[in-house]
Amino acid sequence: MSTESAVAKTSATQYGPDGFGRTAKRWLSNSGITVGGLLLLLILFSTLIGPMLLPHDAFDQSLVHRLKPPVWQGGSFEHLLGTDHLGRDYLARLLWGGRISLLIGFSTIVVAAVFGTTIGVLAGYFGGTIDLVARFLIMVRLALPAVLIALAVAFIAGPSLQLLIIVLGLLLWDRFAVVARATTLQLRHTEFVVAARAMGCSNLTIIRRDILPNIGSQLIVIGTVELANAVLIAAALSFLGLGVQPPLPDWGLMISEGRQYLLFSPYLITLPGVAMMLLVLAVNLLGDGIREVTDPEAKGR
Amino acid sequence: MSDAIVLSAEGVSKTYALNPGFVGAKREIRAVKDVSLQLRQSEVLGLIGESGCGKSTLSRLLLGLERPSSGRVELAGKPMEGLRRKDIARMLQPVFQDPYSSLNPRETVEEAVSRPLWAHRVGNAATQRQRVAETIDAVGLPRRALSSYPSQLSGGQRQRVAIARALILQPRILICDEPTSALDVSVQAQILNLLNDLRAAQDISLILISHNLQVVRFLADRVAVMYFGEIVESGPAATVLAQPQHAYTRRLLASALDVAPGAGLPPLEALMES
Amino acid sequence: MSTPDTILSVRNLSVQLPHRAGLVHAVRDVSFDIRRGETVCVVGESGCGKSMTAMAVLNLLPRGARREATAIEFLGEPIHTAPESRLRQLRGDRIGTIFQEPLTALNPLLTVGDQLMEVYRRHRPRRQHEARARALDMLAQVGIPRPVERLGQYPHQLSGGLRQRIVIAMALMCEPALIVADEPTTALDVTIQAQILRLLVDLKDKFGVALLLITHDLAVASRVADKVVVMYAGEVVEQASTAAFFAVPKHPYATGLLGCLPSVSAERSGAPLQVIPGTVPSLVGGVAGCGFRERCRLALAECQRDIPLVSNSSRSVRCIRADLGDSV
């Protein structure tokens, strides 16, 4: 404790713009951020650009070439990862499926974050009846089994990508709301918020300038956890046939389609499984890393 | 020093409801009881009290951030309830105890200090920058500190930033809640000198809330002693601190230790409630 | 180096702590003695290393910290080389400890009585049956009314002042020879602070215990200490008997610090308080030369060299500009 103050005092004499270089260095020296970030970048890059570079289209069927094994199991270099039961190039489908997974993941998180953060911040900041209503909503949400609801909605309304995103977004907002509410509650009583009120700033200004920037890092961490969550639930729904519909490739759907060939062509299941694991791992590593570097206790200024 | 009263409280009380849940009896706590005080132009009024005496609640009432349960607060002769938040802000600004939590960690010094101007739409970008620079000079911060974030500053420097932010709208009154109690003595001396200079140079009235009698003695013209939500004694600082009448004031004074080598500590009877 | 009267003797104590920016030299070359029944105050501002010094003596440094000393002797026994198990025996038995925050010093799940008796049972296993009587006696000693009732209460049922009294009672349970108190009153209200200090000093005198008091408050030091150790940037800059130190402090930092203090009894003159310009130097990687030179009005070119602690009969000063003379 007294060392901290000694060090803080000394750094006090170093003026100048916010050490952007120092911040960047701290972030990059965290292995979670570098490994997770690189992996995620790699996945993003290959799924977005990859399909354009491949000789095969993900939708071109060729029954002659069906169920070709990947190259290390005696397949040809023509189809690096082999082909599926309709003779479509599995690598192309895997990359295409990644696009869909990422699209679902990120869109869901945006919906969930906007919805949850709004509720949480309003509840924490204004308290009273708004807080009561928000807490009720959170409680109701926590009482609902997310996967079951998504299944039911997809079953009733018929599967569609947009619907999947909106339903998942509206099911995964609770952690954003809980964290935003708790941190806002703490911030509301800090002296800089009271000072902002005393200087005549509007509530909107205070939320925008004092609250949101200071809860951002916590929300990013929640975002990474929920992103992984959304990808997994979406895959589960697709597996059950209530998410992404064929012929669109999706990792969950690909696993489902590969089920009947499990015995002789296990790669049909393991490859999308490994891809999903890598994506979830990357996102979780990144989230852990961000939590580590932004945690004020670990920061030691 | 003129006799114009810039801020006054008349019979102000504040009651909080404890345990307002679904079950259990409602209990009430009276944080401030029937407090009356007046702050005159260019005066420093020391509000003395220990934790839980209601001084922080009183400061929020005086700042207009909360409404009294009964009684009235007047700012420059007008009832506080009738004033808009922004009009109050132009006349009255707070300085808080903890320079670590009184600044938004994500704002640079320049952003923090210029924010009141921005919120009140005073001047354009150029004149705002000019005014920020002048205020930074006035509180004795180097201009290169403008682009720093609070975490890059020491406690004393942060408290200077907080004072600059409070001063930039040129208010007539500052309400300082324990402005130096989180600081080391050598830094405390700098901040006390700064506040002393400001009231002389800028014709500002101060309410100085503190438990530290040395600090109050250094700055205050008049003092009021708070105990369990009430003002138990008030008067000119020199009189009250030299000849305290109330038992609590006497006990406080006995507990306030100056340097006195070999003098030992006062006897327990003087320090304990009788 | 130590007389039979010496309770604690610390020689050339240094503490280094790892930090992202490098090694923080939090305590450098600190030496002092405490004799039987004596009160020694280590004073200084935050970050000067005074708490670390106390923690280093008790072997309670944070993880990763490195401690070096040519000697730390308690009642003639070298404890800087002793294993942690020996220190654990001594703490709470022959060395009582009192820390700043009374709430964290007490276990919230155990009653006051359990905690007091636990100390006694651990260190006096053969006299367990006396524990309760001893606890009641100590509660009475620290001025707690209705001690029997208090024994069964939990820490959260007590005020801050009462809790700190319990902590003092705990420190005294096993008749220690030394009490190490690190800012024992800082977390309390002013009126309670003076009470607790008074109590601590009275009991110390009554039981003949030596007291190592870490404080930022020069006024407290001036009133209770026999000897004052002033620390700055990890080093002892001046060490003297209380009378000699407050009569004429010799180190420019000590002089400056005393000048900063506003007074409650003095007439108000309107004159500004003295200030010490500048800020504390970085302790990362150590400090070369006098740590105070950049804030010092008397600094010379020679101050960039390491300054030795120079002593005469009544004090030691780490400053080449200080005139020790022989008059003091």
Image: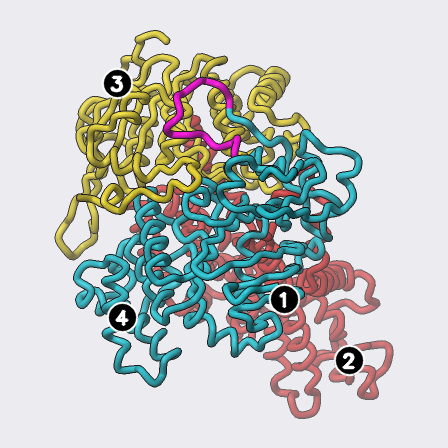
What kind of residue is marked 2? Gly
Q: Nearer the viewer, residue C198 or C149?
A: C198
Query: Considering the numbered disc 3 on the image, is that residue within a helix, a strand or a loop?
Result: strand
In percent of width and height, residue A81 lies at 78, 78
Residue A279 image-quadrant placement: bottom right
* Chain ID for cyan: C
Label 2 neighbourhood size at 10 Å, few (<14), some (14-19), many (20+)? many
Q: Outermost residue toward the front?
A: C327
Residue type at tag 4: Ala
Q: Rate crowding at label 3 as few (under 14), some (14 to 19) or many (20 or more) other CA atoms within 10 Å.
A: some
Using the image as rendered, state which of residue C91 and residue B182 is in the foreground. Answer: C91
Residues at marks 4 and 3 on the same chain: no
Q: Position of residue B35 (x, y in %)?
A: 21, 28
Question: Which subunit holds the residue at mark 2?
Answer: A
Quick one: quadrant of the N terminus of chain A?
A: bottom right
- Quarter occupied by residue C125: bottom left
Give the percent coordinates (x, y) of residue B97: 43, 37
Q: Which mark is residue C71?
A: 1
Chain displayed in red: A
Residue at mark 3? B79
Of badges 2 and 3, the one in the foreground is 3
Q: Residue at x 32, y 32 (%)?
A: B60
Q: Which chain is yellow in the picture? A: B
Q: Amino acid at mark 1?
A: Ala
Report the span colored magenta: C258-272
Which residue is at the far top? B2
